[in-house]
Image: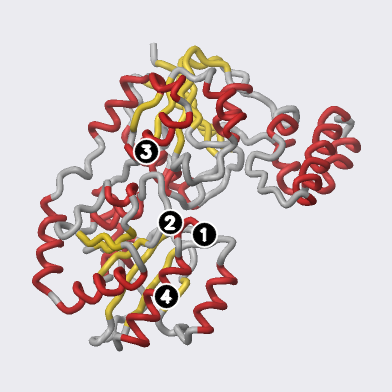
């Protein structure tokens, strides 16, 4: 008989974890496994890439109502004769207001209330996998019946705003917890030494073949002869350091005189702040917030250089993708990026905005260096999924 597996995830919107999950599901052995997928919101650009073998479960109707309109959720539940859900949604609102008054960032706000609003899964599974931190991990323990529970952490515990007490409680119920880089593993071991035996590294996965195929697609802008194209993919949030990328672009354009076209692919809460800074530095024609797209690869493929300015990462899927497309990379010298880039071999690492600008300058001015990096990236056989996939099968 096939083993029954369920993955729990927020949605399939554009993101590294989401991309990795879709890749895993595309590689799964469906002769051995029957796979369900539960999403808190059945939405996202990657939905269309789900293999037909995956059984996409219906989203929870009451949770969707709550998420869509939290302020009126108590009234909606009362009208629908669901007093318990009305009560807990009201408690959630009180908790939200209380934290606002205290100026707290409550990333995990209200799971103890939300778990009374959202229903559980009725089916019994051999293995259930909470594929994302926060609600996915907690839902997997509280609302899924399975013989074995596996969780995933996709960020650095030292730098991301996790809830230590809540995680410590829920980690106790997991058989294994995977994280996506050695740096993230070190952080988990430091914070939770009592669970050290449960932790392991399973790096994010990509489909190199698919990325290269999608990279061949045409784009709607023609590159001018004197332009240097730089690409960056990432959410427009503080973590990705795109405010620093604007400063780097300012150095390249206004101090060093290069004709840069820097395309950024993603959406997020920092968009207005970034647009204001771009305008202030007169970079509207040089630093372009293109928006979210399910195919940034056709842009990366036509770029000269890929740059990442993240302040911290889990395991940067976008860097992995740039490597798959053999693009010279310049990145912040943080541990998470240094695991993926060998300085002076397939890219450059830098410590400041000025250093990043100088490394980009080096690549622009030295075709031989660019060619060396490209050649090394084409020979790189580490962008494979066999080892990581085998780790997942071992856990199952």
Image coords of residue 362 (percent x, y): 19, 74
Confirm or deny contact between disc 2 and disc 3 (CB under 8 A).
Answer: no
Left or right: 97, with 297 as reference point: right
Of tags 2 and 3, the one toward the viewer is: 2
Identify which residue is drawn at 33% across, 67% down: 299
Question: Callout 1: helix, strand or loop?
Answer: helix
Colouring style: secondary structure
Disc 1 versus disc 3: distance between alpha carbons? Answer: 20 Å
Residue 238 is marked as: 1
Q: Earlier in the sequence, mark 4 or mark 2?
A: 4
Asked whether 60 or 72 is in front, the reply is 72
Residue 180 is marked as: 3
Left or right: 91, with 238 as reference point: right
Asked whether 26 or 259 is in front, the reply is 259
Residue at which label 2 appears: 311
Q: Earlier in the sequence, mark 4 or mark 1?
A: 1
Image coords of residue 365 (percent x, y): 17, 79
Confirm or deny contact between disc 4 and disc 2 (CB under 8 A).
Answer: no
Residue 247 is marked as: 4
């Amino acid at each position: 008989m096939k083993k029954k597996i369920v993955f729990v995830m927020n949605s399939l919107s554009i993101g590294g974890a989401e991309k990795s999950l879709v890749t895993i599901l595309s590689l799964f052995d469906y002769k051995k496994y029957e796979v369900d997928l539960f999403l808190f919101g059945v939405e996202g650009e990657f939905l269309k890439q789900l293999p037909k073998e995956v059984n996409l479960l219906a989203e929870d109707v009451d949770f969707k109502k709550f998420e869509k309109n939290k302020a009126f959720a108590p009234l909606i539940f009362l009208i629908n004769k669901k007093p318990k859900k009305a009560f807990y949604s009201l408690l959630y609102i009180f908790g939200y207001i209380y934290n606002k008054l205290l100026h707290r960032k409550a990333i995990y706000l209200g799971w103890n209330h939300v778990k009374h609003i959202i229903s559980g899964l009725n089916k019994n599974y051999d293995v259930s996998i909470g594929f994302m931190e926060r609600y996915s991990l907690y839902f997997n323990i509280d609302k899924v019946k399975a013989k074995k529970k596996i969780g995933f952490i996709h960020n650095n515990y030292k730098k991301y705003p996790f809830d230590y007490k809540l995680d410590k409680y829920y980690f106790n119920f997991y058989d294994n917890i995977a994280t996506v880089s050695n740096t993230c593993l070190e952080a988990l071991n430091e914070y939770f030494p009592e669970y050290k035996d449960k932790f392991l590294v399973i790096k994010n996965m990509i489909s190199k073949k698919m990325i290269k195929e999608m990279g061949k697609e045409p784009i709607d802008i023609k590159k001018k002869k004197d332009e240097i194209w730089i690409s960056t993919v990432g959410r427009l949030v503080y973590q990705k350091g795109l405010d620093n990328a604007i400063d780097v672009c300012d150095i390249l354009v206004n101090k060093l005189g290069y004709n840069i076209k820097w395309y950024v692919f993603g959406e997020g809460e920092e968009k207005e702040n970034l647009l204001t800074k771009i305008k202030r530095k007169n970079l509207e024609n040089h630093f372009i917030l293109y928006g979210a797209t399910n195919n940034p690869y056709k842009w990366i493929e036509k770029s000269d250089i890929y740059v990442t300015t993240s302040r911290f990462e889990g395991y940067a899927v976008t860097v992995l993708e740039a490597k798959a497309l053999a693009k010279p990379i310049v990145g912040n010298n943080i541990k998470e990026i240094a695991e993926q880039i060998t300085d002076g071999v397939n890219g450059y690492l830098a410590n400041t905005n000025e250093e990043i600008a100088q490394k980009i300058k080096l690549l622009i001015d030295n075709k031989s260096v660019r060619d060396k990096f490209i050649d090394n990236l084409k020979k790189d056989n580490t962008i494979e999924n066999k080892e990581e996939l085998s780790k997942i099968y071992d856990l199952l």
